[in-house]
Amino acid sequence: MAETVSTPSENPSRRDFIYIATGAAGVVGAGLYAWPLIDQMNPAADTKALSTTEVDLSSVEEGQQIIVKWQGKPVFVRHRTQKEIDEARAVDVSTLRDPATDEQRLVVNGEGKYEPQYLIMIGICTHLGCVPIGNNAGDYDGWFCPCHGSHYDTAGRIRKGPAPKNLVLPPYQYLTDTLVKIG
Amino acid sequence: MRLSKLTATIFATAALGLTAGSAIASEGPELKHVEFSFEGPFGTYDKAAAQRGFQVYQESCSNCHSMSLVAIRSLGEPGGPFYDEEHPNANDNPVIKAIAAMFTVTDGPDSEGDMFERTAKPFDHFPSPFPNEQAARASNGGALPPDFSVLVSAREHGPQYIYSILTSYEDEAPEGVELRDGMNYNPAFKGGQIGMPPPLFEDLVEYSDGTKASVEQMAHDVVTFMAWASDPKMEERKRMGWMVMIYLFIFALLMYGSYKAVWRDVEH
Amino acid sequence: MSGYPGYDPKSGIEKWLDARLPIVRLGYDTFIFPTPRNLNYWWTFGGILAVILMSQIITGIILAMHYVPHVDLAFDSVQHIKRDVNFGWMLQPMHAVGASMMFLAVYIHMFRGIYYGSYKSPREVLWIVGVVIYLLMMATGFMGYVLPWGQMSFWGATVITNLFSAFPLVGESITQWLWGGFAVDDPTLNRFFSLHFVLPFAILGLVILHVWALHVPGNNNPTGVSVKNVDKDTLPFHPYYTVKDGFAIVVFLMVFAAFIFFMPDALNHPDNYIRANPLVTPAHIVPEWYYLPFYAMLRAVPNKLGGVITMFGAIAVLFVLPWLDTSKVRSMRYRPLAKLFFIIFVLACIGLGWAGAKSPTDLVFVTGTDAATGAPTGLSFLWFARILTLYYYVFFVIILPVLGLVEKPKDRPESIEKSVLNTTHEEA
């Protein structure tokens, strides 16, 4: 090499500036370029459009449960019998692993109207994600998870087994007395 | 440099080749020259025109033409004809909800195993007028009404082509042209004979904004709507395109500055 | 090529790592590599190609996350990408336009190699690896174009796979084997997807070999004169050529971005927005622009097998190019006659591309009208393509071998350094 970069004839500070500016512009550009590459893995517009679903509760007969799909997950909609409601209310809340009254299990975020017979929950065991068996299964007449033996009562609260929490409530609201919008 | 002359020759020839290439496009019947708001690097969809065009599609075209790749919600998504800043989520947009409610879609199977009809929701795609291609052909004298989803992109000079088709019908075929049974004379269509009867006529629709519904006006509007359906992200694409170009331009200047600085003391 | 003092680890950690995995040394040797100081902008296309290849691999992996290789769903899934996937409207054209940009860059890269004699000893293997990369690019690009499952995808796939049926005896078996059936269908689409996904990684491996083969003899340069004195004739690749390549890459990206954002369909055929229909052939089947010259050669020969052989031969001849050119002078800068024939060669390639896009019966120019029918007469694209195809072969098989023996080259500079000083002074 006959010549090198560090010839004194040049103003070093101006030169450094252009190098730093170029490098910074390159880094910024790479960062902006990276975002679309990452964001494309987030839910697409069609997936997001399906993020609400409406359920007609009048089609669920007393003592029955239907499972609707919401955001790719099963949602239990149970029309409880008076016996189930009474059982759920007879429990001493302070003895529960994840304390919640029956009323708290029927409304989301503690507000809005509710119908005591309709219980709406995400049907995924809070232990490791299996779908519990319904229709008065388990030791507490509610749901029983076959994977690792978690028992939920008639309000979907964890009573026995490895699961740490009650079955999760999805965000939902009553549009009419019998029409519920989930999501 | 000696190569610069060579470069000039090659680029000149390439440019010649490109012009020659664009001459390919001019094959076939002559198209009407009509301008649209969405042309050019700054072009955007004329929202009012696209809304009117949707009305034309919905009241007239959709009786035969499907648009199965387009979701109803996309009408209210950014860039769409009914996008409303107050309802960035198209599912909550009352206009979109009302539009969805105009359509019926087949869903199912229900718990009995039967398919059932229900009112469309914004996330549904536009329902097709015919259950399958055979049914569409059977109802249209053997001709298949093409799907509108990407039709503008699927034709050379799509907007001008579709506009020309819609506005070039003639009641009588010129002498010497023998129309086949069920065909209509349209000089803008290749061969001059088209299965589709004239779809537009004066005051076919009643525009709520008071625009006179002439054939030309409706054709222009529906083409704007179809162009949007084919390329719903165009506005976002061009907007980002300008930001990218400006960034690259500045970055190129900086790169050139660095290049000059690094090579400053080197003869080359 | 040796020259500069190698990597000199200073700290303990650097020495420790260098003794176990000399990866820093590898990077150092790759980037602080003696590079002729007189490389012009034509030499930046290697770096440009590396950037596009990486871009294609990244966007390709992403598209594969959303694409569905099934005849009933492929077309819709591409629309799903463009309409619903976040930034899909940008990523899909990046990949589709990227293919065109890669071919544009590779053609310039190859023409540069031919003009400056970069295939000549001791760089024959470097050139051959490059031709293999080009062949794999053609295969990858072709299979990628099938994936959107539009009309051109389907009929392009049908026409190209049918080429193999031209071979006697085994032709029919080969096409059925390629298809996995009796026509282009779901099995074909699935295997094309699989191969389209994996081939770019083979290309990447070959690119590493290409760079390795480059770093043994070192870069050729516009004078074609070998490096004699490393200190006087060369500069370290970094920072000199990283900034020069970087500048060229950014300028190239501007062209790339202009297509992606403002005319994403300019290089595509409208018919590919029509779902593939095995029962209806489009009026004109036109391949992607980068295959047009070969398509013109295929159609120029009236015999089916002859056309196929002519087309594949046009690529095969590139493999033996280092031994066809008999001239001892590398750069055509000092070969006036060769330079003239080279310019005609470039024009012939562009002309073949033009002919490939036109119908063979169309006329290049009109000379008169037929007395009997009144139809215009003149040079048809069929004959235009035939003449140019002939020239393509003559250039490689006759002109280059003969010219090397008869041509009297101009004086060449003694060294790269001398040539640099002379030009600078001429211009000053």
Image: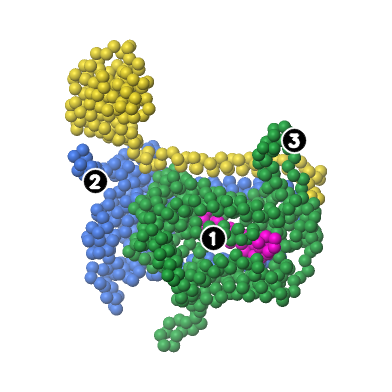
Q: Which corner quadrant of the image does residue C374 belong to?
A: bottom left
Secondary structure found at label 3: loop
Q: Is residue C387 above or below residue A57?
A: below
C259 or B166: nearer the viewer: C259
Is C282 magenta? The answer is: no
Residue B76 at what x, y percent from top left?
Answer: 36, 43
Residue A85 at what x, y percent from top left?
Answer: 22, 19
* Residues marked 2 and 3, same chain: no
For label 2, count other residues whose C-alpha is less than 10 Å away and answer few (under 14), some (14-19) or many (20+): few
Is residue B46 visible in the rendered image? The answer is no
* Residues marked 2 and 1, same chain: no
Secondary structure found at label 1: helix
Residue at 40% from the left image edge and 55% from the top image edge = C189
Rendering colour (chain B): blue
Q: Which corner quadrant of the image does residue B110 belong to?
A: top left
For label 1, count other residues whose C-alpha is less than 10 Å away and answer few (under 14), some (14-19) or many (20+): some
Residue C10 disc label: 3
Residue range of the region highlighted in magenta in the rendering: C98-124
Is A98 displayed left or right of C324 in the figure?
left
Residue C298 at what x, y percent from top left?
Answer: 48, 71
- Identify the chain drawn in yellow: A
Q: Chain of mark 1?
A: C
- Identify the chain drawn in green: C
Q: Disc 3 and disc 1: Cα gap in Å?
A: 44 Å
Residue at 76% from the left image edge and 57% from the top image edge = C227
Q: Chain of mark 3?
A: C
Q: Disc 2 and disc 3: Cα gap in Å?
A: 73 Å
Residue C135 disc label: 1
Q: Nearer the viewer, mark 2 or mark 3?
A: 3
Is C111 magenta? The answer is: yes
